[in-house]
Amino acid sequence: MSDYKAPLTDVRFVLEHVAPLRELAATDRFAHADPQMVTGLLEECARFCEQAIAPTNREGDAQHSVQRGDEVKTPDSFPRVYRQYVEAGWGAVGHPEEFGGGGFPLLVVNAIKELITSANMAFSLGPLLTTGAVEMLEHHASSELQATYVPKMVTGEWAGTMNLTEPHAGSDLGVLSTRAEPVEDATYRITGQKIFITYGEHDLTDNIIHLVLARLPDAPPGTKGISVFIVPKFLVNEDGSLGERNDVKVVSLEQKLGIHASPTCVMTYGEDTGGAVGYLVGEPNQGMRYMFTMMNDARLGVGIQGLSIAERAYQQGLAFAKERVQGSLPARPEGASAPIIEHPDVRRMLLTMRSQIEAMRAVTYANAWWIDRAAALGDSDEGRNAQEWADLLVPISKAWCTDLGVELTSLNVQIHGGMGYVEETGAAQHFRDARIAPIYEGTNGIQAIDLVGRKLPYRGGEFVQEVLSELGGLTSELESAGLGEVAKRYSEALGALAAATRWIFDNRKDFASVLGGATPYLRLFGTVLGGYHLGRGALAAKRLLEGDGDGFDPSFLEAKIASARFYAGNILPQASGLAAAATSGAEDLFAIDPANL
């Protein structure tokens, strides 16, 4: 497996010319996020990821996490590297300063997430879940609960989990059956079983703080009757020290297709004592609303996983293509073999990976930028508009990027040929690891339903028309800059998106037909957004080439323009087919009786 090299120049280009950090740093909320200082922060993070985390990736896949009674042992290198992660303070970068965090914008946090996830996706999942748990507690827990649990979760000394899924309740959480019985001391006794709990048990931290969805005895049915509880692995004494072990334990670990080093646990609550001690977060029956507080960040974080694993696979495929000698070319002497990177089809695969990775990075970073802008501007017209942009982009970031993560890691296997299909090279690991991302945090089909069912109707559809208008302004800029062919392809793709969007609104009363095309519609929207941001990047690269370059190597800037041209010529033409699929309705989906499928 090739070494990982953090793509800092690409990250810097996006932070300066696609999702401008300087504009966030101009607000009161993020005034301390000086771009030059952030550059230094990312350089240090890159060193840590390259030297400490990345070497654990292959070992973790081979060793797995293993269960030993009520405990779980992670791969040998994980505890050491996790201690280094905590000591360096990487988990605290984005949390509020009042809890010991750095208060940096999500844009910066997600750049750090990209590097850590590329280095080792399985390792990154534990910190990702802790971050999400902290965010919910910051917003909804009492000051007493916050003081007890949040500071050590911010530092990473304690880990956090999210306990939602049950054997009979996957995406449909309204039917979950875990129970919470109140007792006289104002605590609760939690009983039930949860599955698919990432890092539900491990040996990286002294305590694990589980956030558990459960029902109170008098709760209404469905999602309206769900509450959320803190259930710590070890109870916490009044002085902050750890007390006795709570009645929460791991039953088994799932044997998964990928992310082998990440322990995915089946957990039981109250099996031995009749109830694990739990503490109600916020108000009763508000658990689902509280969960949605962290949903944008969590789903965007999973989208970053698609980007990250694709980047790692691309670096490996590129290195292999430069080294692997196979076949001959007309330009070479007869009988002389060539590195496969000289073959046009291999170049096509590499540029398919490269251009879409650049598009994914731009879209996900822009998504974080809008979330930060909304937070900085608050309850103002501009702040509400920024939140609309953030909400629209989240399902696209999550679904489009994770679908591409699977496709692009598969291309890496193809570039390797037969060597990619054996575990020896490590190419298969990236493919296996990537496959989970389209499933968790809401399957990609659910993301598509969210896009067409909840996000497009914002302000009666007026908002999405504003978005399409904003995207349309790029065409004339591309033409004026001499990028006419890019402008032509982009304009055609945007037209297909606009037509599909009109069809959705015209047919919204026939929601089954709209849902039948929701997934290709989301893919269409993501593809066009990728073209928009690559086009903006090409314009920035041209300006820099005509000026002093602002520290970017001319060959790097020329490659940015070439990537935009390739994307326009090879990816954007897919838009017309996606639009046709998005507007084909649902009749044919139900034309075959299930017995004959």
Image (spheres, rainbow, N blue to C red):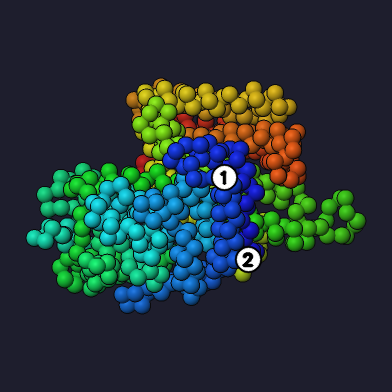
The residue nearer to you, when weighing 328 against 59, is: 59
Residue 1: image tag: 2
**Callout 1 secondary element:** helix
Q: Which mark is residue 490?
A: none
**Left or right: 135, with 183 as reference point:** right
The furthest residue to the right: 333
Residue 356 in sight from this viewpoint: no
Residue under numbered circle 1: 35
Q: Which image quarter is the N terminus in?
A: bottom right
Whether residue 596 is situated above or below residue 112 in the rendered picture: above
| Residue in the picture at 27% in, 67% down | 240
Q: Residue 248 in the image: x percent, y percent?
A: 25, 68
In what element is the residue under mark 2? loop
Q: Nearer the viewer, mark 2 or mark 1?
A: 1
399 lies above or below 44:
above
Total numbered circles: 2
- Decide: is 267 above or below 529: below
Q: For residue 91, what is the image quadrant?
A: bottom left
Q: Position of residue 111 (x, y in %)?
A: 53, 50
Specify the amino acid type for callout 1.
Answer: Pro
